[in-house]
Amino acid sequence: MFNFLTPIFVLGIITLGIYKVFELLVCRQERRMIIEKMEGAALADYLKSLPAGRLNTVAPVGTVPGVLKAGCLLLGLGFGLLFGFILLNWCACDPSYEMRSAVYGGSVLCFGGLGLVVSFIVERSLARKDGKE
């Protein structure tokens, strides 16, 4: 049904992979140049002055990563598909293709948006609990 999307996804994945390889090589070369230029205490001072996300990819303790947002979005999309399926099976009529696509599309968008709103509310409540706002 969605066979026309396969080449787009394959091209996107290949492009992302090539970009990440070049980014890795460039960052590694930059780090080596910085280490060669600096020695001892100057290097330690420079590394301390960098933002936390620049050195490691792990989020600092107390912050909510984007995993919560992605999880809530995917959960909302799943509930949207389930709701659309139940709604179409609950109806006594035999819906046309346009009706089915409208029900599935609308329910996925509504529940996906609801998942993002829930994610925003949870992030905000966690930020208030930590005293950031």
Image (cartoon, rainbow, N blue to C red):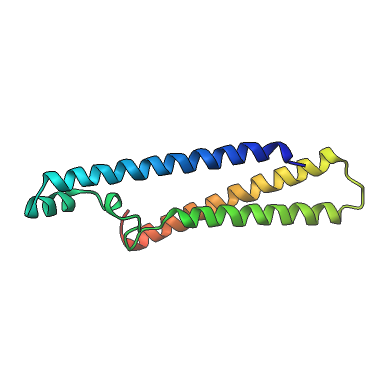
Task: Measuring from the top left, give residue 123's x and y in whole percent.
Answer: 43, 56
* Residue 30 point in image, percent of width and height: 24, 42
Query: Is 23 positioned to the left or the right of 70 in the image?
Result: left
Can you tell which quarter of the image residue 26 is in?
top left
Q: Which residue occupies the foreground of this view, 59 or 129? A: 59
Residue at horizontal 62%, vertical 36%?
8
The N terminus: image quadrant: top right
Q: Give the answer, above or below, for where 35 lies relative to 12.
A: below
Between 6 and 108, which is closer to the camera in this rendering?
6
Outermost residue on the right side: it is 93
The image shows residue 47 at horizontal and vertical percentages of 18, 52
Q: Classify residue 23 by image quadrant.
A: top left
Left/right of residue 77 with respect to residue 69 in the rendered view: right
| Closer to us: 126 or 59 | 59
Query: What is the x, y in percent for residue 9?
Result: 61, 41
On screen, residue 49 versus residue 18, left or right, reads left
Q: What is the tally of numbered marks visible in this picture?
A: 0
Q: Which residue is pictured at 28% across the width and 49% down the height?
A: 54
Looking at the image, residue 91 sits to the left or right of residue 32; the answer is right
Give the residue drawn at x 71%, y 43%.
Answer: 105
